[in-house]
Amino acid sequence: MTAAVVLTPVSAPVADHVLVVALDGALDYTNAELLRRDVEAALGAEHRQLVLDLSDLGFCDSTGIRILLSIRKLMQERDGAVTLAGPNARLARIFRLTGLINAFTVAPSLAEALDAVGARSTPR
């Protein structure tokens, strides 16, 4: 049985329209829908940017990737965007091979993701 992926809000010096959360564990078919619901519950009406810190995400299967894409779609419907921070080498390779690297803004670290969000977004 796979350990559930844990979604943890990250306290970071960002504008009110940015939500930063960290994923820890394994994201797969057993828990992907729960992650989607948790993200939707964490998003406030003011959030236009979502930063997902993947540095502690040990595994992600195709269902997990589908959920990340559905979260991206949700953010696009809100006129927002998703930035992925610190994916491990395996996940980054999967994103490159599948072309999903072009569907998201991907930063090597949370600090760089926060810089990217700050550089491209302004509070509404």
Image (tube, grey):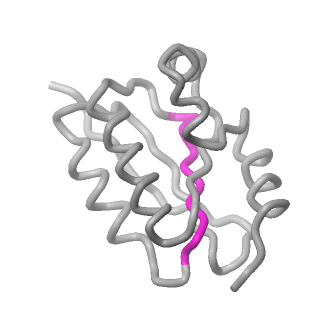
Number of on-image labels: 0
Residue 67 position within the rendered picture, expressed as x and y whole percent measured from the top left: 32, 43
Using the rendered view, name the quadrant where residue 79 is placed: bottom right
In the image: residue 71, left or right of residue 18: left
- Residue 30 in the magenta stretch? The answer is no
Q: Main secondary structure of the magenta part?
A: strand
Q: Depth check: 102 or 48 in front?
A: 102
In the rendered image of this protein, does residue 68 appear above or below residue 82? above
The spot of residue 10 in percent (x, y) is: 58, 60
The answer to which quarter of the image holds residue 84 is: top right
Q: Residue at x 63, y 66 (%)?
A: 11
In the rendered image, residue 118, in percent from the top left (x then y), is placed at 80, 63
**Looking at the image, is 45 positioned above or below residue 107?**
below
8 relative to 33 in the view: left or right: right
104 or 64: nearer the eye?
104
Please indicate whether residue 71 sits to the left or right of residue 19 in the image.
left
Q: Quadrant of the N terminus?
A: top left
34 relative position to 73: left or right: left
Residue lying at 64% horizontally and 41% vertically, measured from the top left: 85
**Vertical comparison of 23 with 58: above or below:** below
Q: What stretch is highlighted in magenta?
A: 47-56
Q: Which residue sits at x=53%, y=23%? A: 99
Q: Quadrant of residue 51?
A: bottom right
Compare residues 38 and 122 and report the one nearer the observer.
122
Quarter of the image with the C terminus is bottom right
Q: Residue at x 57, y 45 (%)?
A: 53
